[in-house]
Amino acid sequence: MTSSYLSSGVSRRRFITSVVGASALGAVGFSVLKPVYANDDMVVKGPRVPDVKPQKVSTHCYVIVAKDPEPTPENQGMFSNMGFIITQKGVVVYDTGGSVQIGEMMIRQIKKMTDKPVVKIFNSHFHGDHWLGNHAFIQEWPSVEIYAHENLHKALKEGVGEFWLNMQARATNNATAGTVITAPNQVLKGGEVFDMGDTLLRVHYYGKCHTDSDFCLEVTADKTVYVADMLMVGRVANMDDGSYVGSIEGIKKLKTDTQATNYVQGHYKFGPKQADIYLEFLEIIYNSTVAYQKEGMSAAEMKDKIVAKMKKFRDWKGFDALIGRYIAIAYTEAEAASF
Ligand SMILES: [Zn+2]
């Protein structure tokens, strides 16, 4: 399977079908499907995104928190968190949001807090809600370094940028129009360390977890780690590109490697317990699936039994709609592992 984000599962297919349908019925008078490197005045651009005040996580670390679990016309495609770190050597951004408008909103917030330029950007993984905002930053600081794992660079060559650009446009009735796919210009493999004067930044890569391109960024002075979607406490959404075993092992290593006191997620709340809570969530699903599979049960037969063990997670956004899909993915992974 070369393009897992394109192959997608049932729920993803339904989602895409429904947004395509909505877009076809709506009045779409211009194309965002073929972004061009044009003069600004030639591009029809969606409206600006209202300001969201950054929250302070720790001494150097901030995050702009998105309130919704999915892109809608009302939220203009803003459903992922964006982190930034104010260091002696400039501002470092971890995720730029899902459109040029969201990136511009983030730049406005950063400029309210510091005169320092953004000197480094990290794109946490290939899902476009986390990096399509690169466009805004490269317009503001043309020489800014944009880092991403080598597998994100690979996914871009396979069309992940177009996939996400179109999805964001259709889900928001083109509120994200004008966004140009802006690729990262630096390659990470994991293990890199950046000296920012008053803190080090460490890159931790653990193989395939939420995707094969996610890495965490540790801010050593603060014991804070930006983890993006490797931890997703509060939201059941997308395991289609990930691995249960990879995630469980990766999260355990992350805990040992960083001894972090704060984890900043790609969606919803940051906090000290996120790694433990998400680990428990994944382990209940995967370990139960393996056990029931050994007893000869199908994914459908085990669903209710597993859900019954997950009472404390029932209020997570998307739980009822997508937990069956999560179990089906665990089933497929467990089946492959047993051969
Ligand atoms: Zn993601």
Image (cartoon, grey):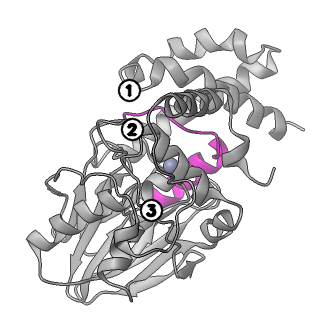
Q: How many marks?
A: 3
Q: Secondary structure at mark 2?
A: loop
The residue lying at 53 percent from left, 15 percent from top is 307
Q: Is residue 244 above or below residue 298?
A: below
Question: What type is the residue that disc 2 sits on?
Answer: Val
Q: Is residue 336 above or below residue 253?
A: above
Q: Is residue 69 above or below residue 106?
A: above
Residue 11 position, x and y percent, is 61, 27
For mark 1, what is the residue? Answer: 316
Marks 3 and 2: CB-CB under 8 Å? no
Residue 24 position, x and y percent, is 54, 32
Marker disc for residue 131: 3
Quadrant in which residue 70 is drawn: top left
The residue lying at 19 percent from left, 71 percent from top is 60
Classify 10 Å Cα crowding around label 2: few (below 14), some (14-19), many (20 and above): many
Asked if residue 178 is among those painted magenta in the image, a careful observer would answer: no
Question: What type is the residue that disc 1 sits on?
Answer: Trp
Most foreground residue, 66 or 275: 66
Give the mark nearest the N terminus, 3 or 2: 3
For mark 2, what is the residue? Answer: 233
- Foreground: disc 3 or disc 2: 3
Marks 1 and 3: CB-CB under 8 Å? no
